Image (cartoon, grey):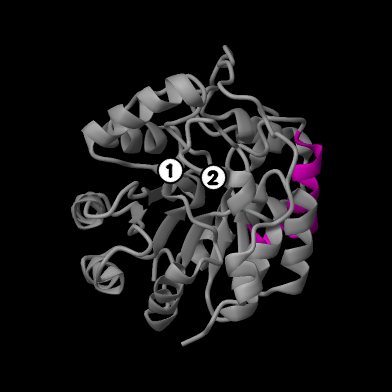
């Protein structure tokens, strides 16, 4: 068993500034009917590595929370319609994420996701579990056996730090089964609607403690680590077991996207395009249009828009 450094697992980082103010407004803008052709991406090759799929009642509860504490959801679509919407517009493959907000519900959520994956071959589904709940490793092992291909955790919703001792058994289970782990370990977007303070729980140094303690764990952090972009860019240079996804960070919604694009341009081989669809307050293709306007080299676009995600999630293998 690998122990996380006690100094990081038990001591909160220094106080941080207040962060972005919630709730935020929607953006009323036109949307395209297909992936921006100027990207030069062959139809069907684009991978959206960050899509949320939940059972209907959970989706509805999440949307109510966002309306009050986050931002207005533009696309209040249920699972079948989320998948159909994306594929009809030229997305070739979806990585579907969910998260358990309390103990005792992960098995049911994982069974739901496994059925989605069984009936939709262009969807790769991730498992979830509540850190510290009884028999967490078995919950994940059963999920892997049912066809799920990794784990999603959310520090803000589940109220834990990425280097908390309760996560050790989850990390070890992922390593043992060679499954990737996606963890929302960046400190933003912060909201008073959470039952804990993400600025206390989340810090780039805590993520680095995990990367050092588990060098064979394939770890992805969404939102390019917002808003500690420079810190996560440094981690990419130090650790070969870290990946990032772009989700909402390239939309200039929370702040100007210049800092976020610097990470993409520096390490496109470790970056995956993702959207947070359907839980977004703007057009589904807003980030794609901004990526197209950036005029990245062809090889970088191929990595970010599909190749990196296909390798990380072993899509097609």
Q: Residues within 10 Å of mark 2 (few under 14, many from 20)?
A: many
Label 1 Cα crowd, 10 Å radius (few <14 / some 14-19 / many 20+): many
Residue 241, horizontal then vertical, whole percent: 61, 73
**Residue 284 in view, yes or no:** yes
Residue 259 within the magenta-colored segment of the rendering:
yes
> Left or right: 298 with respect to 97?
right
In-front residue for pair 34/209? 209
Query: Where's residue 218, x and y in %?
Result: 53, 71
User: What residue does disc 1 label?
Assistant: 51
Could you say which quadrant of the image residue 250 lies in? Answer: top right
Q: Residue at coordinates 34% horizontally, 34% vertically from top-left?
A: 82
Q: Is residue 63 above or below residue 119?
A: above
SS for callout 1: strand
- Residue in the image at 33% along x and 59% along y: 129
| Residue 312: image location, x then y, percent | 52, 66
Q: Which residues are magenta?
A: 257-271
Marks 2 and 1: in contact by CB < 8 Å? yes
Majority secondary structure in the magenta region: helix
Numbered disc 2: secondary structure: loop
């Amino acid at each position: 068993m690998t122990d996380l450094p006690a100094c990081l697992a038990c001591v909160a980082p220094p106080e941080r500034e207040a962060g972005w103010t919630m709730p935020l407004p929607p953006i009323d803008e036109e949307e395209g009917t297909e992936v921006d052709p100027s990207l030069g991406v062959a139809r069907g090759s684009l991978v959206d590595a960050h899509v949320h799929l939940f059972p209907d009642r959970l989706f509805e509860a999440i949307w109510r929370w966002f309306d009050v504490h986050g931002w207005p959801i533009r696309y209040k679509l249920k699972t079948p319609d989320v998948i159909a919407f994306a594929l009809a517009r030229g997305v070739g493959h979806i990585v579907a994420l969910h998260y358990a907000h309390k103990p005792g519900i992960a098995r049911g959520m994982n069974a739901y996701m496994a059925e989605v994956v069984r009936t939709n071959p262009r969807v790769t589904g991730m498992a979830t579990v509540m850190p510290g709940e009884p028999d967490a490793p078995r919950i994940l092992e059963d999920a892997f056996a049912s066809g799920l291909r990794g784990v999603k955790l959310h520090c803000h919703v589940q109220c834990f730090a990425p280097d908390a001792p309760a996560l050790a058994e989850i990390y070890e289970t992922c390593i043992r089964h060679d499954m990737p782990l996606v963890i929302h370990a960046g400190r933003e977007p912060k909201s008073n609607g959470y039952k804990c303070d993400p600025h206390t729980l989340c810090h780039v140094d805590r993520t680095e403690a995990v990367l050092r303690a588990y060098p064979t764990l394939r770890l992805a952090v969404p939102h390019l680590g917002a808003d500690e972009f420079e810190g996560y860019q440094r981690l990419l240079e130090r650790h070969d077991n870290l990946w990032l996804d772009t989700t909402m960070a390239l939309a200039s919604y929370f702040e100007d996207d210049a800092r976020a694009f610097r990470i993409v341009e520096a390490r496109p081989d470790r970056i995956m395009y993702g959207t947070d669809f359907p839980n977004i307050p703007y057009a589904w293709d807003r980030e794609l249009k901004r990526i197209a306007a950036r005029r990245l080299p062809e090889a970088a676009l191929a990595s970010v828009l599909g190749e990196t995600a296909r390798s990380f999630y072993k899509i097609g293998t």
